[in-house]
Amino acid sequence: MDTDRNLYIKNMVCDRCVMAVKQVLERAGLTPVSVALGRAELQEAPTETQRKEIRNALEALGFELIDDPRTRIVEQVKSLIIEWVHRSDRRPHVNLSQYLASGCRHDYSTLSKLFSETQGTTIEKYCIAQKIERAKELLDYNELSLGEIADRLDYSSTAHLSAQFKALTGLTPRQYKQQKSLPRIPLDKI
């Protein structure tokens, strides 16, 4: 029987995911103490039967329980980056490497090495991909200027954002807005 009160969950990328996971846990008869991107802390450890029920219910919703410690860390890094990029208005005033090291309780070089080994890309490239998806979202809303988007995503200039945007999408932000046919990538698929 698993005595761990913490569950680690893959593919949680937004507040709706948090609500869905919380509902799954409550339907399984458990009391969540907290549910955040990639992690749920329970008041009591689930029984093996509850764990199987949770696993099946989560998989039906596109989530996955993570048992491997290395995978847990990588998913935690991804969740923190998503939070860093998509909740920039609530971001602490530290750089990304400090934020990840603090959030994962591992030094950044360990996180970087593990991430690269398991994901085939670097933390920096993953973060840039998340930022470009966020830029697409903000461009689709058509509420902010490119300068405001660059500022919100911590780019040094609109030129820097535009260069990275074009490198990843093949289009400039202006071309993207005009074309409107380039699909956005779901955050859990980046």
Image: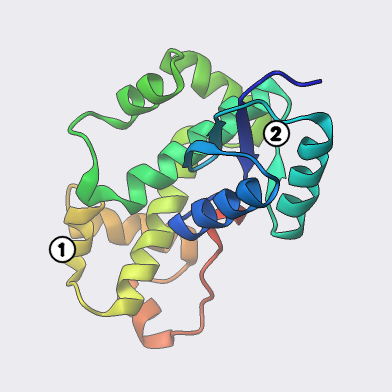
Please indicate, yes or no, whether residue 154 appears anywhere in the rendered image: no
Quickly name the residue at label 1: 148
| Residue located at (50% from left, 23% from top) | 112
Question: Does residue 159 appear to the left or right of 182 in the view shown?
Answer: left
Coloration of the structure image: rainbow
Which residue does the image show at 58% across and 35% down from the upper left? 75
Give the quarter of the image for residue 49: top right
What residue is shown at x 17% (from left), y 54% (from top)?
A: 151
Residue 101 image offset from top left, x and y in percent: 39, 20
Q: Which amino acid does label 2 sit on?
A: Ile
Q: Residue 66 carries which label?
A: 2
Looking at this rendering, what residue extends furthest in the front direction?
29
Q: In this view, does 118 lie to the left or right of 21?
A: right
Residue drawn at x 47%, y 67% is 170
Give the alpha-carbon distance from disc 2 to disc 1, as whole Å.
Answer: 37 Å
Circle 2 packing at 10 Å, graded few (<14), some (14-19), many (20+), is: some
Compared to residue 157, the image places residue 118 above or below, namely above
Q: Quadrant of residue 117?
A: top right
Left or right of 94 on screen, residue 125: right
| Image quadrant in which you'd find residue 61 | bottom right
Question: Residue 28: horizontal and vertical position, in percent?
Answer: 70, 46
